[in-house]
Amino acid sequence: MVDSVKNYGIAGVGANVQLGKSGVTIVGSNSDQISFTNTSDQLVNVNLADATDDTHAATKSQFDGIVNPKLQYVDTTVTHNGGNVSLGTTSSNTWIHSVVVEKDAGNWTDYDSSTEITVGDSGDLERLFAGFDPSGSQVKIEPKHNYTSATALNIYVTQGGASAGNATVRVWYSGEIA
């Protein structure tokens, strides 16, 4: 007896494929994504192995293991005559996403055009922030700068004519500042 194959002109499977009788259905909603549903069209969990290549899907345990890249912030309060204030030292591969400088209630008394707050490092005192406005309330800059090696960060307060005033400097980063 010779085995025979019947060809009904089928080129492939449909967009949706059910795995077994009353099993999970793989729903191909478009060419870029799929869903896994039960017989009631409810999404179901899918178990994955840990990714071993850049193109693989990652598991929750792999994401939970990432400590440093989480978005964090550090707040430091400066005064009108505070001079240079240390923010800390970055570890290598620390990203600075944004810097917000917000003056406290009230004005910076007697400020003038030379009154300024900048945030940076010894290589560039304004690398992360410049443009403090003592007459406003908040200024935000998004430098998105990556420190590839350990670098000391500082806040530089230039008093100018100011005789009073405080501000909070908030630095949003991923990585580590110690």
Image (cartoon, rainbow, N blue to C red):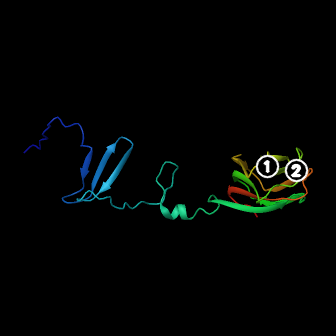
Q: Secondary structure at mark 1?
A: loop
Callout 1 crowding tier (Cα within 10 Å): few <14, some 14–19, many ≥20: few
- Looking at the picture, which amino acid does disc 2 mark? Tyr
Residue at x-position 17% and y-position 34%: 9
Residue at x-position 19% and y-position 37%: 10
Q: To which residue does mark 2 refer? A: 111
- Looking at the picture, which amino acid does disc 1 mark? Ser
Callout 2 crowding tier (Cα within 10 Å): few <14, some 14–19, many ≥20: many
Q: x, y (%) of residue 150?
A: 78, 56
Mark positioned earlier in the residue sequence (1 or 2): 2
Q: x, y (%) of residue 75?
A: 74, 62
Give left or right: position of 121 versus 98. right
Residue at x-position 63% and y-position 58%: 69
Q: To which residue does mark 1 refer? A: 135
Q: Is residue 155 above or below residue 10?
A: below
Query: Which residue is more in the foreground, 139 or 3?
Result: 139
Q: Which mark is residue 143?
A: none
The reply to whether callout 1 and callout 2 are in contact (CB within 8 Å) is yes
Give left or right: position of 49 versus 15. right
Query: Which residue is more in the foreground, 142 or 177?
Result: 142
